[in-house]
Image: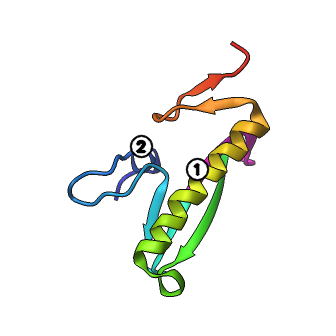
Amino acid sequence: FPSHDITRNRRINKEGELPIGIRYDKERDRFIAVVKDSSRKTSSGDSVQISKHFLVKKYGYKEALRLAIQARKELLEYIENKNGVIYSDFHKIIDNNS
């Protein structure tokens, strides 16, 4: 089972891996869009994770995946605007004030 850091940095490939920040929860049959907000910390010091879930049963497989991808883009935009930073394709933070 891959670590979270490896999972979030995956790219789509021919074998059907999911885009960065998108996970499939087989047990609950849903796609999950995930973003970490480095400006907020948990009690253990980790970045707070923000996520949105889309049930395959409700939307169908392709639509649930599409909605999760769109939600992740929106979550990234929200965090970028809130924190004044830009995330690159490889999750490196680029300071807007530089």
Instruction: Kindly identify the amino acid type of the residue bearing the numbered disc 1.
Output: Lys
**In the image, farthest residue toward the right:** 82
Residue 71 makes an appearance in the image: yes
Q: Which mark is residue 9?
A: 2
Residue at 70% from the left image edge and 21% from the top image edge: 96
Depth check, front residue: 94 or 39: 94
Q: Which residues are magenta?
A: 34-46
Relative image position of residue 43 (x, y in whole percent): 75, 48
Q: Quadrant of the C terminus?
A: top right
The crowd level at tag 2 (other Cα within 10 Å; few <14, some 14-19, many 20+) is: some
Lower sequence index among marks 2 and 1: 2
From the image, tell me which residue sits under label 1: 73
Secondary structure, magenta segment, majority class? strand
Task: Classify residue 19 as left or right of residue 30.
Answer: left
Within the magenta stretch, is there residue 50? no
**In the image, farthest residue toward the top:** 98
Within the magenta stretch, is there residue 39? yes
Task: Classify residue 48 as left or right of residue 26.
Answer: right
Residue 45 makes an appearance in the image: no
Depth check, front residue: 4 or 72: 72
Could you say whether the residue bearing mark 2 is in a helix, strand or loop? loop
Question: Mark 2 or mark 1, which is nearer to you?
Answer: 1
Q: Quadrant of the N terminus?
A: bottom left
Relative image position of residue 91 (x, y in whole percent): 52, 35
Residue at 47% from the left image edge and 73% from the top image edge: 63
The crowd level at tag 1 (other Cα within 10 Å; few <14, some 14-19, many 20+) is: some
Q: Is residue 8 above or below residue 31?
A: above
Residue at 32% from the left image edge and 51% from the top image edge: 12
Instruction: Kindly identify the amino acid type of the residue bearing the numbered disc 2.
Output: Asn
